[in-house]
Amino acid sequence: MSKFLSKFFAIREIPVAIALVIVLGVTAFANPAIVSRSGALDIFLGVSVVAFLAVGQTLVIAMKHVDLSVGSTIGFSAWLIGKSTADGHSLIYTMMMVLFLGLVVGALNGYLVAYLELPSLVVTLATMYIVRGVFSQISSGRTIIASEVPKPISFIGLNSFYVVPYMFIVVVVLVFAVGNIMHRLRPARDLYAIGSNLPAANLAGIPVAKRVFSAFLANGLLASFGGIILLSRFNAADTNSGTGLELNVIAACVVGGVAIAGGVGTVYGALIGAVLLQSITMALGALGVGQFWQLAVNGLLLILAISLDRYLTLRVKPSTIMRVKN
Amino acid sequence: MRIKFTWDKGVVLLLIVSTIVGSFITPYFATSSNISFVIQDVGEIMIIALPMTYLIIAGEIDLSVASIVGLTSASIGFAYVRGVPFGLSILIGLVVGTLCGLINGILVTKFGLQSLAVTIGTLALFRGLCYVLLGNEPVDFLTAPITHIGYDNIPNTFLPYSTILLVILGAAAWITLHYTRFGRWTFSLGINPGAAEFSGIPVQRMKLLLFTLTGLMSGVAGVVYSFRFASASPSGASGYELAVIAAVLFGGVAIAGGVGTMWGVLAAVMVLGVIRSVLQLSNVSSNALLIVSGSLLLISVVLPRAIEVSRSRRKTSTP
Amino acid sequence: MQKKLTRSLIAIAAVAALAVSVAPAQAAGVKGIKTGLKIAIMPKALNIGYFDAWNKGAQTACKEIAAKCTYLGPTEATGPAQVQFINKVVQQKYDVLVISAADQNAIIPALNKAKAAGITIVTSDADVAASGAKSRVTAVLPAASERIGTAEVDWAAEAAGKKGSVAILSAAATAANQNAWIAAMGPYLTKTYPNMTWVGGTVDKSVFYGDDDATKSTAQFNAILAQYPDVAAIIAPTTVGVKAAAAEKQAKKSAVKVTGLGLPSEMAPYIEDGTVEKVGLWNPIDLGYVAVYAAGYAKAGTFKGTVGSSFTAGKTTYKVTAGGITYLGDPFTFTKANIATFKKIY
């Protein structure tokens, strides 16, 4: 039994999941009015954008890299969708533009990090600025308003399956799709090897550059398609859309067990991490914690999560850190 | 004698070139009032870039610096509005900044947490405390004594008072990094922490000290910020951290640690300020500045690498 | 001979009349204002529809007084961001600055420097704090804070059936205009609607700040609902905030009543489908228009902004009241009945 328990708690996603249950439980107990349709909608809608981005970011962080450009990309994409629709283009054409944006940004990041072997922090910091600058220049103050959002996109935001907005269902489907790929596909599992021990990965014959490039390309594409979710969430887009999201996404990943040191973590964990952070925000409100304390408490909890994560990592045997299904 | 081209020399060159070119592009740039403004504009970023250079060279990073600036400013406001004498309020602000740095240092050294991740947490924590302190009441310092040195020039010159501070701090940081044992130790930390430990350098204590110093300097920047705007608001200096890091990296400091020069960083901060000023005065929109900053940052890492790659290719191709 | 002379005179008179009638209207300028002034029009931030309308009015006035006007400003509504542009205005040697203050304190040192450099400053829409009043000639504001604040409370009470709790979704904590209106709302609610309360007990504890940013305003709307699920009405005295609140209310299908200051063109869809019953606003076009005239006269030296002095813009004469403030008049309200007309104007 104890062996089962120790293995159970060694699963990185468990502590986060437990924390989530506790937070929700405490909130429901303290303020029963929050257990309502709008309370649930609040969490699902609020978490969708960050959770969507966290999927791609997990791929990148697992390799011990980071991608700071996602906020600029997703904002640009949301605006492009609105502008393209307002100009009368078909949905297909609009999606082609989104695809193009994701390919360009992802390939640029990927090439510089994988083939020129430049540090991802610097590269993606630079592309974050460049993409934001190009975006601001092209948009020059033009705001996208609700009527310019394509109907299918606003639909998934405004409508729900019982209490779950379709937008969130899209995110969950993505998480399970990518999670499955990460678990089964050999090339995907290589990402963990690259993150935990690069020299060993090289020696083992893993085509590191190819994998790193693919991961950044995928993340770029995901960030771009994430524009759909962002536009759906706010039914508006402007020059500042997406600003600052990158740090929230990294926080969600880290809280969800995707360690900055690389080599561990799953997209399921990242999703739970994102939901947990959103629930805490809601919980603080429901518990009557003044709005001015919320940001501070969020920061404190992030630090706690990182500390706990490190503590657990030190306690667990190295052989169980990297779970690989045979 | 062949002068070896290094990136930081390139940045200094770029500073000279951009200043000259700028004066021709727009007549408004090379005026004494504008130079005064540019110096004020880059002031806070330059002050924070000094300790950030040490940190990155030592292999660490701190994303919470902007929040510390804001928290220092908020603390000064909080104390002042409750009747604490202005001078004492400033002191309180500096102590708060130093404490924040200390917290970061403890989390990284004693708890062993990754600085990138944990400073994202303290970024939120410290910024959140700004809101806790000030809430919805921004504080007005206009009537406080000596705030005018935040935005006035030294009498009979076109230089703002802050120039004195920048020169002193910049010189101190430069000398310490390149001519003292403390500076050499900082480089050792970044090049090889294991070897540094082995050769007797107190690695953990050094890192703790570096983070604490970063907090103190961010506090100083916070004081400068409060003086310049004669006010404190909870969202003060939001977003500065990335600008500081970008400037430091652009100045030739390698993110992996162990490489960099202080004059490269100082020149980089000035270059970015000059370019922003020239672009603005030529009526180019601020979007262009974002693109230029990002591109310069990219070039700063691509160029040395490209040179390195072509050099190694040439080496292997010769029989 | 007589006939020929008369004929020529009539011909000349006709040609002269024709010439005068087709001559471009702006060549004349306005008496009392120098022509060719270089004027900077600075909003709290660009990309806000309200300020686009504000600028429209300013540009109309500029054409009438034959001045050269440029619309410029930051992309985020903060003081430090505006300071950069104020300094640009100084460097590029503008004559006049018409500005809506994003931060009532932080821009004062910069404005004082601008004034010292010879630039005439008029604040419009949002003023600086009293300690900075001498940097600007006058502040052109919509209506007395009490009237704007109390009107919004009336709309909220009306929508909520005069009972329940009320929260406020404001702009930046540093904005003088919103703060003044909120200060007026507090005692008025308590006095006039005994069955209504502020969610936090006092008005000060019931304000949430959306910083004139759509994303942040949406998040704050949700924060209000999370903290006070039974809130009856939310007042958003900012066009960005009220639009975000209406959009989020629609998305969440929430029952809370939303009202505040809204631009008719932006709020039309929400009023037409019933999400929002009523919002109000003055005409920002007028605010911009009058401000430019005030500045023009001030530059010429004929208008000094002292209490009791007055000036004429267009067909109306405006008088300066206590604190150096010039008021325009009461806000309009927009409901299903009149939204169709107003959404085309601004």
Image (cartoon, coloured by chain):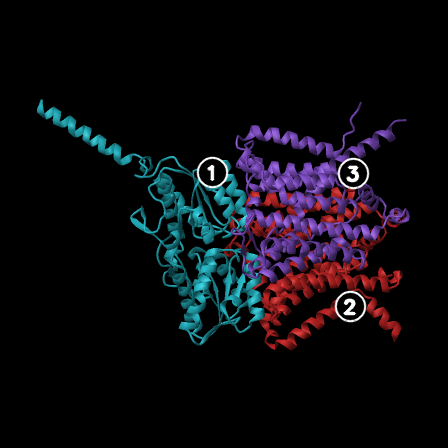
Give the vertical position of C1 relative to C275 (above or below). Answer: above
Q: Colour of chain B?
A: purple
Q: Amino acid at mark 1?
A: Ala
Q: Could you say which is closer to the camera, residue B105 or residue A30?
A: B105
Q: CA distance from mark 2 to mark 1?
A: 64 Å
Which disc is residue C117 wearing?
A: 1
The reply to whether callout 3 and callout 1 are in contact (CB within 8 Å) is no
Q: Position of residue C295 (x, y in %)?
A: 38, 43
Q: Quadrant of residue C335?
A: bottom left
Task: Give the residue type that dot 3 points to.
Answer: His
Q: Which residue is mark 2?
A: A14
Q: Amino acid at mark 2?
A: Ile
Chain A shown in which color?
Answer: red
Q: Nearer the viewer, residue A112 or C61?
A: C61
Against C19, is A10 above or below? below
Residue A83 visible (yes or no):
no
Pointer 1 chain: C
**Position of residue C68 measured from the top left corner of the image (x, y, whole percent):** 41, 37
> Where the N terminus of chain A falls, by quadrant?
bottom right
Mark 3 — residue? B178
The kind of secondary structure element at disc 3 is helix
* Residue drawn where x is 44% and y is 56% of the image: C263
Q: Secondary structure at mark 2?
A: helix
